[in-house]
Amino acid sequence: MGKENIKAPDSIIAAEMSIDGDVAFAGSIVINGRISGMVKGEQAKLGDSGIIDGDVVLQDFDCGGRVKGSVSAERVRMREGSEIEGTIFAREFDMVPGAMFN
């Protein structure tokens, strides 16, 4: 068995953090805190405790938390317990049982 090539995220927004304003980034980010504003970048993972109150524009979005706003990405994955309240525009979309989309 070979080892998976797992890369650490370039940035992390911890569960205790709250950002009011837009977030733009290159590379990858893990969001466990709250963002009130647009999130724009390449690859993002929204953790179970993560909340985005604003639009999301990414290449790859792995959603485990809550989003209130539109999501536009090449790939969107909604994990169990995740919730997106808004419009989703995606080339590839994967939603598991237990995820919610309104």
Image (cartoon, grey):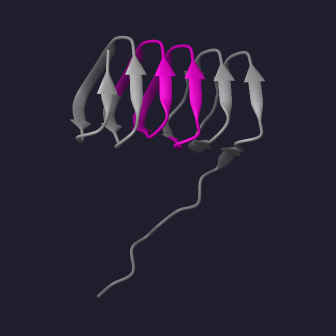
Identify which residue, 24 or 31, lies in the foreground: 31
Coordinates of residue 38 in the picture (x, y in percent): 59, 16
Residue at 62% from the left image edge and 41% from the top image edge: 32
Above or below, 4 relative to 16:
below
Residue at 40% from the left image edge and 22% from the top image edge: 84
63 left or right, relative to 96:
right
Coordinates of residue 95 in the picture (x, y in percent): 24, 36
Picture quadrant of residue 4: bottom left
57 left or right, relative to 32:
left
54 left or right, relative to 91:
right
Per the image, is 38 magenta? Answer: no
Residue at 55% from the left image edge and 24% from the top image edge: 40
Per the image, is 59 magenta? Answer: yes
Residue at 67% from the left image edge and 29% from the top image edge: 34
Q: Which residues are magenta?
A: 46-73
Picture quadrant of residue 21: top right
